[in-house]
Image (spheres, grey):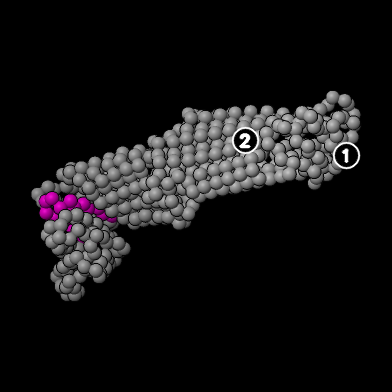
Amino acid sequence: MSSITTISATESNTGFTYAVGDNSTVEEFLTAQANTSVSMVLGTGSSGFNLTSFGYLPNNAGTFWRLRNGTGSQVTGNLSSVSGSFSNEIIMPAGTDTFVSSTVTTLPATHILKIGTTKITKAARTGGASIGLPDGLNPDDNYRFLGSSGNDDLTGGGGSDSLFGFDGNDLLSGADNNDSLDGGNGNDTLTGGDGNDTFNVAADSDTILGFGNGSDILVVGSGATASVTVAGVWSATASTVNNGTASLLTAGSGINLTAATGSSGWTITNSGSIATTISGSNNGDIINGNSGNDTINGDHGADSITGNSGADVLNGNSGNDTLNGGGGNDTLSGGDDNDSLDGSASNDSLNGGNGNDTLVGGAVSDTLTGGAGADHFRYNLNTEGPDTITDFSVTDDVINVVSSAFGSLPTGALNPNQLASTENGIARFIYNSGTGLLQYDSNLATIGGLLTIATLTGAPAITNTQIVIV
């Protein structure tokens, strides 16, 4: 969009003329001069212009008429500054899609906008601009809404509108169609409504509502924070970028971030109770399911995924992932790299995949598959199990048990006399090399006090070195 430059401007002039160019902005004049008038001229064939005044007039009188014209025809408007404050009337030709907003302390109680012969009256407002589409404007046209340094309330219409809050804690609502919302500085609240909307969060902490109704786009800048409530199923495109901190809350609507770009991971929380599919980004994400039977895919990056209750399917894919099934009969797959899998409660199925993984079945009977790599099958309590370990490798894998839960044995590789084939009152671990049954003797003084830890499929010939106390 073209800029506005001074053609002739001396302080003794009774008026200043601005035209499309590349140098001084209207702001430089409006914030420095009083008792003068300004004419805005748009050259034929130009794409349009913005007139924006920031800061204060002499004696802190106030600032700011913001005009925008989107046509390519010749138009002229007049804005007068009288005794340090602007007049309350602006006239622009019909059909020029001009919109005006203000935030002032000294303007008259009523501001008037004229588009051709149509007169639109708006009540005065101090501290910020409250802008909607007043009577007389076509709600289906495309408008640009410009806020102020105060706390603004901007509401679009039925067209594809652009809303800019600038400074202050602003409320921006795009309403219908494909809108662009940018709160600017301050902690803003942005609501897109229907259509494919674009949300820009460049600074501070913004709250975004009504997200996901269509193919919405979210751009979060470095150092900025976006807290987003997802209202419908949403799949990100490459135009969605997170270089800051982005949190998504869904009540059961699916989310797919595999195409999203940027350097930062996402935090995604499902508060719904229905089955939901969530796919993370290429970075390290934090994803939390809820009570439904969720399917959660980590994609790339070091992800932290929690299924919570429900029969969940958790896939880490690549990256050093941490998966926790929570309640319910869950299926956990680490994928590539070095993963940590915890089935937690219920009967779970864990598969570490490639890499050096740590698998914790948790309570009840679980099926544990380490996959390729040097895997650790960990038991935090002697009551965990009985599990099935499907692919224990005596060359690469170990069984870790926590000392405090297993007789306070010294840490490190199990002492040879603590592994036997039958109960003998000395050995804490009993292994049947014919069946692959591994048990723990919780009471050495009494025959029959055995707790089953796991059955090792294929009955590999383990020795004390495959059991490590931690």
State the SS at label 2.
Answer: strand
When the figure is inspected, residue 392 is found, relative to residue 147, above or below; the finding is: above
Task: Give the residues in magenta.
Answer: 82-103
The residue under the point 22% across, 53% down is 100
Q: Position of residue 89 (x, y in %)?
A: 16, 55
| Closer to us: 65 or 415 | 415
Residue occupied by mark 2: 350
| Closer to us: 179 or 175 | 179
When the figure is inspected, residue 182 is found, relative to residue 423, above or below; the finding is: below
| Closer to us: 313 or 290 | 313
Determine the residue located farthest toward the left in the rendered image. 117
The residue under the point 51% across, 32% down is 294
Q: Position of residue 226 (x, y in %)?
A: 44, 48
The residue under the point 61% across, 37% down is 351
Residue occupied by mark 1: 417
Type of the residue with mark 1: Asn
